[in-house]
Image (cartoon, helix red, strand yellow):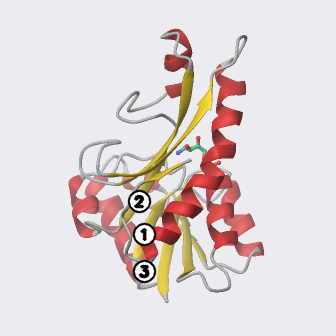
Amino acid sequence: MKRVAILISGGGSNMVKLVESMTGDHPARPCLVLANSEDAGGLKKAGEMGVATAWVDHKHFKGDREAFEKQLISVVDAQKPDIICLAGFMRILTPFFINHYEGRMLNIHPSLLPKYRGLHTHKRALEAGDTEAGCTVHEATAELDDGPILGQAQVPIEPGDTPETLAARVLKKEHQLYPAVLRRFAEGNRKRIEL
Ligand code: GRF
């Protein structure tokens, strides 16, 4: 049975869907939900679902990224995870952390990579006049929002869309895509999923 640690920063809606998906004949189970602040809403939800939780506040490390990441690693590795899922985790991770989990860390990004790496993806897609948007699950590598793509889901951009209405449409797809990719990844299958 593979053990999955999930890193969050906020409400953790993707984390909830991942945890809910790991039941029955699914080859993985959640072993930890970790946040970079004590008041991340997802910690309470994870606790209610019976998953071990922890938090490491990046503000306690005053910009010393490596010290923060060393503490993250010690808390995560205490649960002996096989796979790490970044799910709405909003801290940039340095190669130090990335290399430690090389080949077994996933991330979800709210755009059709390689378009719109970084932030404000929906606003940028709307400003560019795109007719479609979506989300991508990829292996996390040292390059921000790069790495081998494991799955993508597309949504149409509708007339009158705002970044908020588009984000809500994409988030629904994220909640389908990430659990599907995680299951396949936990089975050792890296064939890309297109939703
Ligand atoms: C989502 O848009 C996700 O794509 C991005 O963080 C946002 C919030 O995710 N990575 P969640 O609701 O905290 O899972």
Q: Earlier in the sequence, mark 3 or mark 1?
A: 3
Q: Residue at x 62, y 61 (%)?
A: 15
Q: Can the viewer see residue 97?
A: yes
Circle 3: residue type: Pro
Residue that badge 1 annotates: 185
Label 2 within 8 A of ligand 1 by Cβ:
no
Mark 2 residue element: strand
Q: Residue at x 41, y 59 (%)?
A: 106
Circle 2: residue type: Leu
- Give the answer, above or below, for where 92 lies relative to 191: above
Q: Is residue 67 left or right of residue 24?
A: left
Q: Can the viewer see residue 12?
A: no
Quick one: label 2, few (<14), some, or many (20+) residues within 10 Å?
Answer: many
Q: Quadrant of ligand 1?
A: top right
Q: Earlier in the sequence, mark 3 or mark 2?
A: 3
Instruction: For marks 2 and 1, give the CA distance.
Output: 9 Å
Mark 3 residue element: loop
Residue that badge 2 annotates: 106
- Say whether marks 2 and 1 touch (CB < 8 Å): yes
Q: Position of residue 162 (x, y in %)?
A: 68, 17
Query: Which sits in the foreground, 77 or 107?
Result: 107
On residue 53, the disc is none
Instruction: For marks 3 and 1, give the CA distance.
Output: 14 Å
Please tell me whether mark 3 or mark 2 is closer to you in this view: 2
Circle 1: residue type: Phe
Q: Residue at x 33, y 54 (%)?
A: 140
